[in-house]
């Protein structure tokens, strides 16, 4: 019997991502306050340490990519979960500056490497159109986890007071340990060529020589600036330029998080069933970012004084922005995973992840500098970066592997030897590949 796109233990990745999201959501919304109460250090000291360790932690990305190519993504992912769990477990005991800096550095390195390793794991456990579905489900549940984690931490702190931050730290550590346990049933698919051999000695020179992949990475850097706009630029623009109530910022984040969690799988499925190329879907998502930013320029020009008018307009903008995110994110992520050669996928995705990290580092200074000139200036620049990213993706799609550009359906047949016992484990065998939406 044939079952298309069945992935051994496929539920484990999105469910583990949801649990991981709960842990991350417990401290990200109030990072400085969280670490101030947990360690007892001043806000200034905590902020400086987190900035420095975050930048230094980027050095872990190339190492993690090499480790994935040598050992596989799943063992590296489990190791990162272990480091993050240990880090948050000991944070409450890191009262001195040196101790806090040491724990923060190790934890930051694991955090920076985590997304690239998770993308590599996605590439190992699914192929073709199954990657798109699994990526959409993983992202949706992870976003749901963020919201649940933030709510949980808020409740814990409300009932326990400052001690609640310590409990949240330990709860975060527990969530990472649980996420690692949930990955146990997940098993990589057989290598595409029928072997499980991982060639050694293939270094980052292969990544830097792959110009089409570097173009995809550069386009992602431009789009990643748009992802930083909602948490970094939007609150400043709302308060400083539109003179609107700060409460609208919270409403915008809530709408974005709820839509990402509730509609991620549905929107991804509609895009997939439409037969869109991943490059075109990513370009469309970026174009919707530009439409939302154009709306903000219009708002920044009119500056409505009516609260309901301003609130309604901002809700419409956030919905368009979120739709762009739901279309762009799965397509862009799976495009990078599928364009990376299997033997050096870890290195490729570590380089790709650097585009996200650099955008997050550049965005605050870039946005504040442009905002000082004119409140509409940063949105105008983001429209240009979105348009350039879309053009780069479409221009380079002919130079990318065909099965990376267009989703390909996989058929997995489970074969059991007649001599095998009923208790023996059935091994998945890939038997056919055909474009999504066509008949096999």
Image (cartoon, rainbow, N blue to C red):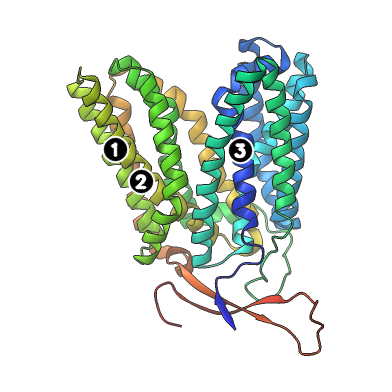
Tell me the mark number nearer the camera, choosing from 3 and 1: 3
Q: Earlier in the sequence, mark 2 or mark 1?
A: 1
Label 1 crowd bin: few (<14), some (14–19), many (20+), radius 10 Å: many
Of 238 and 224, nearer the camera is: 238
Residue at figure coordinates x 61%, y 67% from the top left:
7
Quick check: marks 2 and 1 in contact, CB under 8 Å? yes
Instruction: Please say whether residue 366 is visible from this viewpoint.
Output: yes
Q: Give the left or right position of residue 216, taking residue 121 as reference.
A: left
Q: Which mark is residue 292?
A: 1
Mark 3–mark 2 Cα distance, whole angstroms, equals 24 Å
Which one is in front, 398 or 57?
Answer: 57
In the image, taking residue 43 as reference, residue 92 lies left or right, namely right
Specify the farthest residue to the front. 159
Crowd tier of the residue under label 3, counting other residues whose Cα lies within 10 Å: few below 14, some 14–19, many 20 or above? many
Give residue 336's position: percent from left, percent from top.
Answer: 51, 55
Residue placed under numbered mark 2 in the picture: 324
Q: How dense is the environment of label 2, judged by Cα within 10 Å: few (below 14), some, or many (20 and up)?
A: many
Q: Quadrant of the N terminus?
A: bottom right
Q: Position of residue 101 (x, y in %)?
A: 73, 21
**Label at residue 22:** 3
Where is 35 relative to 8, above or below?
A: above
Task: Give the residue displayed 64% in from the left and 24% down from the top.
Answer: 156
């Amino acid at each position: 019997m044939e079952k298309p796109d069945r992935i051994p233990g496929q539920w484990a990745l999105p469910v583990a991502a949801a649990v991981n999201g709960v842990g991350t959501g417990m401290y990200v919304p109030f990072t400085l306050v969280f670490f101030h109460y947990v360690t007892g250090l001043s806000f200034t000291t905590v902020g400086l340490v987190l900035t420095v360790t975050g930048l230094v932690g980027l050095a872990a990305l190339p190492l993690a990519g090499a480790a994935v190519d040598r050992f596989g993504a799943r063992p590296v992912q489990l190791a990162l979960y272990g480091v993050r769990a240990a880090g948050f477990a000991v944070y409450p005991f890191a009262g001195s500056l040196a101790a806090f800096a040491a724990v923060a550095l190790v934890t930051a390195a694991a955090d920076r490497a985590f997304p690239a390793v998770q993308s590599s794991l996605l590439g190992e456990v699914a192929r073709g159109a199954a990657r798109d579905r699994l990526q959409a489900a993983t992202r949706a549940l992870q976003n749901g986890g963020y919201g649940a984690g933030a709510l949980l931490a808020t409740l814990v702190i409300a009932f326990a007071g400052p001690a609640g931050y310590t409990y949240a730290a330990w709860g975060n550590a527990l969530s990472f340990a649980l996420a690692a346990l949930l990955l146990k049933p997940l098993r990589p698919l057989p290598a595409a060529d029928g072997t499980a051999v991982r060639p050694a000695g293939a270094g980052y020179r292969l990544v830097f020589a792959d110009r089409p992949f570097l173009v995809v990475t550069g386009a992602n850097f431009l789009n990643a600036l748009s992802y930083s706009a909602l948490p970094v630029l939007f609150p400043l623009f709302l308060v400083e330029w539109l003179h609107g109530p700060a409460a609208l910022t919270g409403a915008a984040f809530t709408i974005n998080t709820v839509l990402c969690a509730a509609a991620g799988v549905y929107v991804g499925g509609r895009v997939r069933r439409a037969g869109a190329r991943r490059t075109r879907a990513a370009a469309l998502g970026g174009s919707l970012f530009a439409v939302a930013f154009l709306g903000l320029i219009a708002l920044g020009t009119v500056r409505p004084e009516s609260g309901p008018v301003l609130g309604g307009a901002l809700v419409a903008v956030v919905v368009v922005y979120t739709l762009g995110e739901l279309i762009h994110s799965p397509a862009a992520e799976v495009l990078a995973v599928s364009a990376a050669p299997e033997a050096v996928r870890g290195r490729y995705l570590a380089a790709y992840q650097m585009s996200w990290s650099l955008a997050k580092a550049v965005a605050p200074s870039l946005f504040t500098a442009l905002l000082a000139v004119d409140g509409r200036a940063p949105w105008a620049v983001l429209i240009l970066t979105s348009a350039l990213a879309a053009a780069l993706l479409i221009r380079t799609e002919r130079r990318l592997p065909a099965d990376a550009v267009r989703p390909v359906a996989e058929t997995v047949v489970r074969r059991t030897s007649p001599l095998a016992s009923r208790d023996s484990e059935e091994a998945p065998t890939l038997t056919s590949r055909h474009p999504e939406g066509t008949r096999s």
